[in-house]
Amino acid sequence: MARYELRIPKLGESVIEATLTAWLKEIGDTILADEGIFEVATDKVDTEIPCEVSGVLIEKRVQVDEVAKIGQIVGIVETDASDVPVKKVEKESPQPIIEAKQPDEVPIVIPEITNPIPSEKVSITSTEDRYYSPLVKSIAEKEGIMPTELDTIIGTGLNQRVTKDDILTYVQNRGQKYTQPTKGSIENTNIAKNPVTLGDEIIPMDRMGKLIADHMIMSKQTSAHVQSFIEIDVTKMVQWRDKNKDAFQEKTGEKLTYTPILMLAVAQTIIDYPMVNISVEGTNIIKKKHINLGMATALPNGNLIVPVIKKAEELNLLGMAKAVNRLADLARNNKLSPDDIQGGTYTVTNVGSFGSITGTPIINQPQVAILALGAIRKMPSVIETPHGDYIGIRNKMIVAHSYDHRVINGALGGQFILRLKEIIENFDESQTYS
């Protein structure tokens, strides 16, 4: 009999630890190859981890709700397999206190702070009510955060656990006028303003809801949001799609919605205006090599996730349709991988799918802009011709562009959607998709 080591697999470029949220098998249970054996959660995604061999689970080294590092052994499976895969994990070394490097990005170094670091190292320990992962402890000790100060940080992780992002956000704002709410302030503030009465129902936020809420607040605090709006005549695009959608699906096997056509137009616009495809690190602007389009997608439980279409500038209509359909299907079935939702450089959200004519979306950090596509509506419109003007029925869509005014001024923000309007309104109705 051989012993197979269950380990936390790599879960994305910037992920260095994960919380084991559930064991799907008990000690003594039989497990089949590729069958799910435990579940993990990170600040980015929840996922089920399969076992690579068939056998019997004989040991659990990490319990539910405990944090484990990538590559750490969490359990042992006894197997008859003669060729048990061996996973080599490099010897762990102390982690530098920087954000893990994303592709084509520079590392994010924690800003210097004025708070003096104590001359004597203060030991930070977890308690029954307050657990701190080794990474969080390391950051706290490195930055001179005392245990009493650490206890004031609001945790957005499982069971209100303080995550890496929580403590890095705290360090970034430390010493400024901004103060983080005290523990329980969200709930207490709401209850104080709206007392709970008989018959009211209190619904706790789920884990992802808390993460989204925290991320949205952080984005508003980070970026100076400005919006520009424009109305686009999409009649040519609508007519071409209606004429070709059945043949497109029959020939390619892919469903043709408006989304890939519009995503392709957005990618073409970014090529013309690359300074919206950037991020900000301190006083530096990072201009991205590739256009990785985030596609905001509603999940079955009502939460939102943003899968990413990588290297969108290299795709044609068929390639874009394949990418859009694949990610949308994975999102609907809760099967997105960590890699599917990382590395976005610009985001598009389709508020029109819910009937909204427009919206003012919040920027998806660390990006600097986001585009909201409104509902396509038939509208009476003045049509200019050499023989005079007349009223006709046209398909119209309002587009809203939210951008970070620290690095994108009103001229660039407006010119971007004006160029998008030109591309869509001059849609080539004679084009083919082969």
Image (tube, helix red, strand yellow):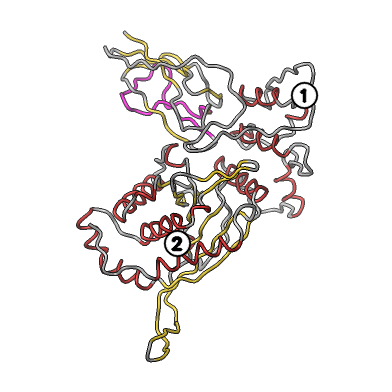
Mark 2 vs 1: CB contact within 8 A: no
Within the magenta stretch, is there residue 201? no
Q: Earlier in the sequence, mark 2 or mark 1?
A: 1
Q: Quadrant of residue 285?
A: top right
Mark 2 and mark 1: Cα distance apart in space: 51 Å
Q: Is residue 414 above or below residue 45?
A: below
What residue is rendered at 47% in x and 19% in y? 74
Q: Is residue 183 left or right of residue 334?
A: right
Residue named by callout 1: 117
Identified by mark 2, the residue type is Ser
Asked which secondary structure carries label 2, the reply is: helix
Q: Is residue 422 above or below residue 27?
A: below
Identity of the residue furthest to the top in this view? 1
Place of residue 84 in the rendered image (x, y in percent of width and height, measured from the top left): 31, 14
Place of residue 333 in the rendered image (x, y in percent of width and height, measured from the top left): 39, 45
Asked which secondary structure carries label 1, the reply is: loop
What residue is rendered at 23% in x and 53% in y? 253
What residue is rendered at 36% in x and 48% in y? 329
Instruction: Please report the bounds of the magenta region as a residue range.
Output: 19-42
* Callout 1 crowding tier (Cα within 10 Å): few <14, some 14–19, many ≥20: some
Place of residue 287 in the rendered image (x, y in percent of width and height, measured from the top left): 52, 45
Tell me the quarter of the image containing the C terminus: bottom left
* Callout 2 crowding tier (Cα within 10 Å): few <14, some 14–19, many ≥20: few
Identified by mark 1, the residue type is Ile
Q: Which mark is residue 353?
A: 2
Q: Which mark is residue 211?
A: none
In front of the other: label 2 or label 1? 1
